[in-house]
Amino acid sequence: MAIVIVDDSATALIVLKSVAAQRREREVVPFSKASDALAFLADKPADVIVSDYSMPEMDGIQFTRAVREFAHLAATPIVMVTAATEPEVTSNARAAGVTHFMHKPINALFFKTLLNELLGPR
């Protein structure tokens, strides 16, 4: 299966993709637009989905709600990457179906550890 990453920041996408690619047994599929990721996910499974919170087309909460409408992704872990510190962002994201959070700036070691927790050791 795949690790799907959605972030409109080219730098964040590079960092997230680089860390995720260390999981050689999983395909890493990056997207800079949430709509492209949703089109991909409509008929494909994913092991983990990583989404930025603040994106121009739709935010990470809207994206998560859309993902959760796909029955085959109902239990897929979704990690939200955010610089937001407002409690309502976390609360709304959890209600939408986000399972884990990662704060910006991205800590590569934390992300690697989180992937190991979600996917199991290699």
Image (spheres, rainbow, N blue to C red):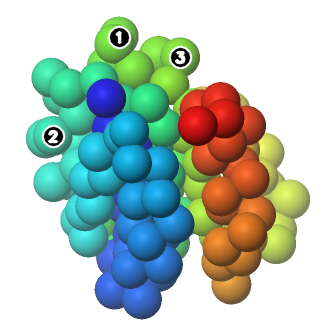
Secondary structure at badge 1 equals helix
Badge nearest the viewer, 2 or 1: 2
Residue 23 picture location, percent across and down:
47, 49
Q: Which residue is drawn at 15% across and 40% down?
A: 40
Sort mark 2 into few (<14), some (14-19) or many (20+) by Cα contacts within 10 Å. Answer: some
* 84 over 67 or under it: above or below: below
Secondary structure at badge 3 equals loop
Q: Which residue is drawn at 76% across and 63% down?
A: 110
The quadrant where residue 82 appears: bottom right
The quadrant where residue 98 appears: top right
Q: Name the residue under label 1.
A: 71
Is residue 17 shown left or right of residue 36?
right
Q: Which of 26 and 63 is in front in this view?
A: 26
Q: Residue at x 67, y 42 (%)?
A: 116
Is residue 111 shown left or right of residue 122?
right
Label 2 and label 1: CA atoms lie apart by 14 Å
Q: What residue type is labelled 1?
A: Ala
Residue 13 picture location, percent across and down:
39, 75
Secondary structure at badge 2 equals helix
Q: Are marks 2 and 3 in contact (CB under 8 Å)?
A: no
Q: Which of 84 and 41 is in front in this view?
A: 41
Q: In the rendered view of the protein, which quadrant contains the C terminus?
A: top right
Residue 96 picture location, percent across and down:
59, 34
Sequence-wise first label, 2 or 3: 2
Sort mark 3 into few (<14), some (14-19) or many (20+) by Cα contacts within 10 Å. Answer: few
Q: What residue type is labelled 3?
A: Ala
Sequence-wise first label, 2 or 1: 2
Q: Mark 3 points at which residue?
A: 75
Residue 40 tag number: 2
